[in-house]
Image (tube, coloured by chain):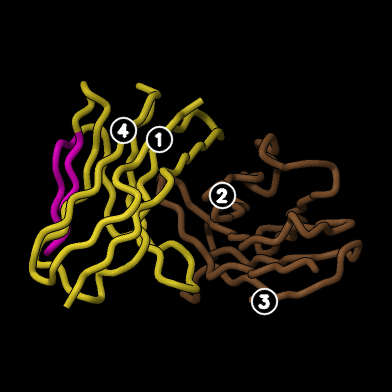
Amino acid sequence: DAGVIQSPRHEVTEMGQEVTLRCKPISGHDYLFWYRQTMMRGLELLIYFNNNVPIDDSGMPEDRFSAKMPNASFSTLKIQPSEPRDSAVYFCATGGSGNTIYFGEGSWLTVV
Amino acid sequence: GENVEQHPSTLSVQEGDSAVIKCTYSDSASNYFPWYKQELGKGPQLIIDIRSNVGEKKDQRIAVTLNKTAKHFSLHITETQPEDSAVYFCAASSSSGSARQLTFGSGTQLTVLP
């Protein structure tokens, strides 16, 4: 299995621009999680889906952030408009019926 | 909600020595405790996990212990090697129905000195 696939791996964008991060989960996994990692706050759960349905989005920082999962093999995390404080590593992780979750390699976002 | 505390934040050991990282959790409903290793520029990788019906689990040089009464769990790495240098995260999880919560500790930067 190819594991969780994220794109882009690195993105540098200007403040105010829209950013879209993408995730392809491991086939058969029905849970998908979006995490953000910063030095100050560590690993924070932003939102997670079960069977393509958002279950808990209480970690989404504000309305500028949105996430979708239109089908079982694809999810996006969008930031519009982006701000410098959004600079972080964004991880997608997926899991099956057990508790174990597997992380992708992350999308490194820099907003200047 | 769940709160996971992890200590120490940094740990340096000589190659060949053992390393121990400790975590505590607050939610007695948590029943799954994974440990992740994160190398520079990469995503966290699961290295070992333990469930609440087990007190200890070993995998070669790595072991995890769980004390449910005290709400403590620890990672033990024996015969450390330079490639063990990384950031290690503990986590605690509970699940109910479709709900799935995994709360991470703040991480431990382990450095193995050659």
Q: Residue B56 magenta-drawn?
A: yes
Q: Which residue is mark 2?
A: A40
Residue at mark 3: chain: A
Residue at mark 2: chain: A
Q: Residue A76 magenta-drawn?
A: no
Cα–Cα gap, marks 3 and 4: 34 Å
Residue at screen point 22% across, 23% down: B70
* Residue A94 pos. (x, y %): 53, 56
- Secondary structure at badge 1 equals strand
Cα–Cα gap, marks 3 and 2: 20 Å
B47 left or right, relative to B58: right
Q: Which residue is mark 4?
A: B24
Residue stretch in magenta: B54-66
Residue at screen point 73% across, 75% down: A11
Q: Which mark is residue A10?
A: 3
- Secondary structure at badge 3 equals strand
Q: Which residue is mark 1?
A: B4
Q: Residues within 10 Å of mark 1 (few under 14, many from 20)?
A: some
Residue at mark 4: chain: B
The amino acid sitting under disc 2 is: Met
